[in-house]
Image (spheres, helix red, strand yellow):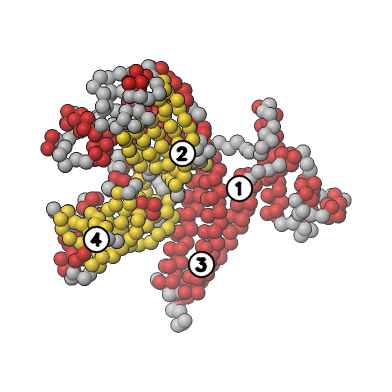
Amino acid sequence: MDKLSPEQDLVSEELIDILKRNFQRVKEMLDLKISTIHSLLEEVPPSYADKKLGEILVEEKKVTPDQLNWALNQQKKIGDILVDGGVIKPAELDMVLAKQAVAREKTRETDQTKAPADTGGQSIRVSQEKLDRLMNMIGELLISKNRIFHLANTINITYDMPPLAREVKSVAAELARISDELQNSIMSARMVPLKVLFQRFPRTIRDTARKAGKQVDLIIEGEDTELDKTVIEAINDPLVHMLRNAVDHGLESPADRRAAGKDETGQVRLRAYYQGIHAIIEISDDGRGMNPDEIKYKAVKKGLIKTEQIENMSNEDAYQLIFAPGFSTRDEVSELSGRGVGMDVVKTNVEKIGGSVNMNSRLGQGTTFTLKIPLSMSIIRGLMVETAGQRFVIPLDAIEETVKLPRKAIRKYKHKMVADIREEILPIVDLKDILGLDAAGAFNNHKKLSANDLISIVVLNIDGLKMGLIIDAFQKEQEFVVKALGEDLANLKIYTGASILGDGSVVLILNCAQLL
């Protein structure tokens, strides 16, 4: 490496000094915190509450019985003596003391509530506020991790000091490992089985069936599927509404079911299971199903579509009309339905947490609603892209692939752009056009490009619906901490939130379901 200038020398020394002080402080703090947090989250034997510190240290093989007897003969606290003698490390002592404190707290809570002992395993009760605070701290830690990687690149490119940049990246990689471990621990602690939500619904079904004069059996499957507690709270109202709809709209009356050759008692099935990084919740019934022609007629009557649109509308498109604001299949208003406020609110609430709602119906056989819900809404993996000089994040689970096509491969069809990708004709849209950043669009602005110049495209796939999104450039893939938008921006459904990058700038996260 060439000799550094006096200015570079000064910058180098200052950076090295700052990095050494800060990284050592951060590492020591994280080593202690991760041990303490793990001890709080992991199962702790309740017997620790009655045991002395020395007995715990011997049981965990931190010290030998001879070392314990030697310590007992001293005139100091056992923990301090063992640390001073170099037998154990201060962090190990802090971890054992934390375990002992947790065990005593658990025993005290058990005595206060007089609850019977749980022979199947032990757990501690932690308030939602504390878990939320821990999750926020993990988010801030991830942002700091990204800032350190950004700093390493700045040192390498701006100040031309590759050795220092490599050292910074090494420390950042260790910090990333610790933060990932902490993130997984906190995330697992926040996960709650759907059983706590599903157990409320039998009464909801009974009350709705009684008011509607119907007989209903509720079948629940997959109640052990776990979701983030925040997500569970967000989907409670949508599920209640859809279950009521299944009884009130979906199932026929006992007389109609007899006439159709069905059992008088209808079935509503609530099923949950995992699918990748999502949980799938299905609400199905064995009722009358939905008539697409009737839906089209109701939509025209309410002014949601025009009469000439019906001819070119498929049954699948007709089913999507039930999610339109103001739509209802009931002419009369009752206690249960007919107010025109329903599935549009359900869809909006589910999409707010990054989920989606789909419907499938067969006339005379029943209807199934499928909710695709993210396991957590705090941290996502995404691809950062650039368009019109601005950066945006596209969630990775919505991306089928990324491709670069020559300009000549994108053609016009009925004033729309299409392209042949993997032997499949896909509609192509410029992200600038959707966001209103450039009325002309990137494709039309590429007039100076030759037919062989490449156009960057992100192929989105939302529940089988595909679309190509033209962008200016791909950036990078990483984890992003999702921050809620302010009140002024919260109504923009095309964004699910925002995140802070390593350089301190803010980037918006796109809602791909709304893009489609």
Going by the numbered disc 2, the residue's amino acid type is Ala
| Mark with earlier residue (3, 4) | 3
**Mark 2 — residue?**
272
Q: Nearer the viewer, mark 3 or mark 2?
A: 2
The disc at residue 191 is: none
Residue 344: image location, x then y, percent: 30, 34
Classify 10 Å Cα crowding around label 2: few (below 14), some (14-19), many (20 and above).
many
What label sits on residue 168 in the rendered view?
3
Q: Which badge, 3 or 2, is on the more N-terminal residue? A: 3
* Residue under the point 37% across and 17% down: 213
Mark nearer the viewer, 1 or 2: 2
Q: Is residue 42 visible?
A: yes
User: Element type at marker 4?
Assistant: strand
Q: In this orientation, does residue 388 appear?
A: no
Marks 2 and 1: in contact by CB < 8 Å? no
The residues tagged by marks 2 and 4 sit, at their Cα atoms, a distance apart of 36 Å
User: x, y percentage for residue 435?
Assistant: 24, 50
Of label 1 and label 2, which has the lower sequence position? 1
Inter-mark Cα distance, 3 to 2: 45 Å
Circle 3 Cα neighbour tier, 10 Å, few/some/many (<14 / 14–19 / ≥20): many
